[in-house]
Amino acid sequence: MDGIDRKILAELQRDGRLTVTELAERVQLSVSPCHRRLRALERSGAIAGYRAQLDASVLGLTFDALVFVNMSTTARERIEAFEEAVAAIEYVVQAQRLFGSPDYLLRVVAADLPHFQRIYDDELTTLPGVQNLNSTLVMKSIVEQRDLPLGGNRV
């Protein structure tokens, strides 16, 4: 991956709806080479897909919570069952397995506190292998969905 590829990726992170013509102009290439590079980046997996960034508050999802999960066991079958069940809960918008304690960090969005309580009581507490849950409310998001760094120099 060279500097031009990084420019293509940076432009697409800023605006995934660019046409190939607009993208080529921004990275100072003609359309054909830009299109070839774009397809190569897609085939390589560097571009995993395209999606719209939605505003949760406009959609009525103004309640944001972080849920810390400690598991009762680390047996592979239980971990797989837990992860599959978490992936099926639509209000869990991020789920990460961690080293150390807690075992997992979930980000859950909801309309309000009663809605979050229903998700917590009806879905999160029934997840397989959960020993305990601890949650905290997000007061304010400072950095969210930041573009990935594409600098050529790695520290």
Image (cartoon, helix red, strand yellow):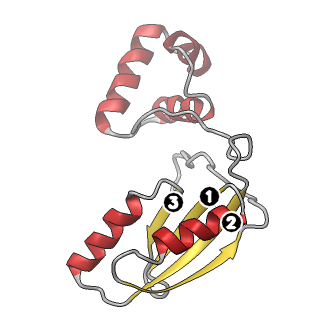
Q: Position of residue 99 (x, y in %)?
A: 43, 81
Residue 94: assigned label: 3
Where 112 falls versus 30 (above or below)? below
Q: How far apart are the alpha carbons under marks 3 and 1?
A: 10 Å
Where 143 falls versus 12 (above or below)? below
Three-letter code for the amino acid on which mark 3 is drawn: Gln
Q: What residue is disc 2 on?
A: 114
Which mark is nearer the camera, 3 or 1? 1
Residue depicted at 24% across the width and 84% down the height: 75
Residue depicted at 51% across the width and 34% down the height: 51
Three-letter code for the amino acid on which mark 2 is drawn: Pro
Compared across the picture, whether 45 is left or right of 126 comes to left
Quadrant in the rendering for residue 116: bottom right
Crowd band around label 3 with a 10 angstrom C-alpha radius: few (<14), some (14–19), many (20+): some
Where 106 falls versus 70 (above or below)? above
Q: What residue is disc 1 on?
A: 109
Q: Position of residue 44 (x, y in %)?
A: 30, 37
Label 1 residue SS: strand
